[in-house]
Every structure is written in structure tokens, then in C-alpha cells.
Image (tube, grey):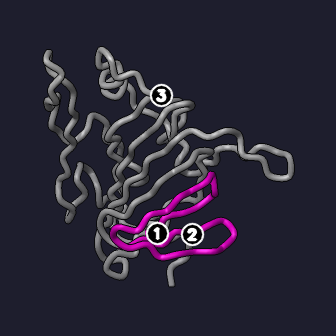
Amino acid sequence: MATSEELLTTSAGYVSTFPAPGLRKTVRHITGHNAEGKGVFLSTDCGDHHRIIGNEQAIANILYSTKETPVELNGDHDVKYAKETEPGLHIHNGSVCRMIDFGPNVLSPMHRAVSLDYGVVLEGEFKLILDSGEERVMRQGDVSVQRASAHQWHNITGNGTLPGRMMWILLDCKPVLVDGKPLTEELNELQPYYEGR
């Protein structure tokens, strides 16, 4: 059995472009309205922001982000923001839709976003590990509702031999208090990929 330190470096060099090898290319469709108010497609692509994570162990695809709730759709303000902004882990008062392709057997660092996160397994199987030591296996179509808990993701697809893919929608939340003290964002080894964005 590999140690956490070994798993944090496994599959180095596996991912250098989107999609990760062995996973299909996904397409994003953004809709809007024509002059008569009919729905039209504004764009069809693979997303504007791709970020390699770790030692080429995973790649994040930011599918969309917003800076406010409710969202201003008039004048395509949201489309412009999503195109021009590569968000950090989450956005205060906004939202982030992030898809991540993981190399085989990759284990993320323990991390916490102070947000409400809906996580969906799109391809493969993942182990969700909490800082308490509790864990659950999630399979394709399974959903996690992360309420600012510290956690890790372990891609166990094909017993750790295949890539896997998850999607998260992160929504802002009010401060979360434990024993009267607010929880803080914890990025650990992920900090260089999200800090300052």
C-alpha cells in the first residue's frame, strides 16, 4: 500500500493538455438571445481556462465563473467576466464550475474551500477522504455536497490504473464557525494553483 506522500507524486507527467490521456474531449455550449429574444448559441468550445495541477498529475478546466448572485446576464456581462477571469478556488458572492481530469491513482492534497461545493463524478471512481479519516467511494453519477469540510480526492478508477474526471460547482457561503472561530481556506500544496487569482 502506497503512503500518502507517494500517492501525492504518482502519475507525474501524465497530463500536459486537455483532455487527460484516456478521457474524451468535452464541449461547452454557451447560449444567449437574438434580437427577437430567441435562444441562440453564443459559443461552442472546450472552455477558456485550463490549468495543469501538480507535477502534470491533473488538469483543471474552468467551464464558467460568475462574480455575483444574482448574476447579471444583460449585455452578456457574465460571458465577458467568465472569459476574462481565471478564478481562484472559489469567488466571494459568485460561483465556479470546474472540471478536473486526474491521472491514474492521483491523490489530491488535503484542502478546504470555505464554500458550498457540489461534486459529481463524471468518469471513473473516486475515494472522498475527510480530515476526520472518514471516507466514501463515489462512482459515476454520484454527488457529494461539501459544506466547507477539509478533504482529499483519490482517483481509484480501474484500481488506480486509469484516469478519472470530476466536476464541481462552488458557491459562496457565509462564514462557517466551529467553537466560535471561523474556518479558513486551506490549500496546502494546491496554493500555487489558486492563490492570487
How far is mark 1 from mark 2, CA to CA? 8 Å
Badges 1 and 3: C-beta atoms under 8 Å apart? no
The amino acid beneath tag 1 is His
Instruction: Check residue 176 for magenta coloring.
Output: no
Does 15 sit left or right of 22 as displayed? right
| Residue 108 vertical placement versus 59 (above, below) | below
Front disc: 2 or 3: 3
Q: Nearer the viewer, residue 78 or 150?
A: 78
Secondary structure of the residue carrying tag 2 is strand
Q: Between disc 2 and disc 3, whose residue precedes?
A: 3
Q: Which residue is mark 2?
A: 129
Graded by Cα atoms within 10 Å as few (under 14), some (14 to 19) or many (20 or more), the crowding at tag 1 reads many
The label on residue 70 is 3
Secondary structure of the residue carrying tag 1 is strand
| Residue 27 vertical placement versus 20 (above, below) | above
How far is mark 2 from mark 3, CA to CA? 33 Å
The label on residue 127 is none
Residue 125 x/y as whole percent: 37, 73
Magenta stretch in the rendered image: 125-154
Residue 171 x/y as whole percent: 52, 41
Front disc: 1 or 3: 3
Residue 155 x/y as whole percent: 40, 69
| Residue 5 vertical placement versus 44 (above, below) | below
The amino acid beneath tag 2 is Ile
* Image point (71%, 40%), residue name: 175
* Image point (39%, 43%), residue name: 97
Secondary structure of the residue carrying tag 3 is loop
Q: Between disc 1 and disc 2, whose residue precedes?
A: 2
The amino acid beneath tag 3 is Pro
Graded by Cα atoms within 10 Å as few (under 14), some (14 to 19) or many (20 or more), the crowding at tag 3 reads few
The label on residue 154 is 1
The residue sitting at the bottom extreme is 1
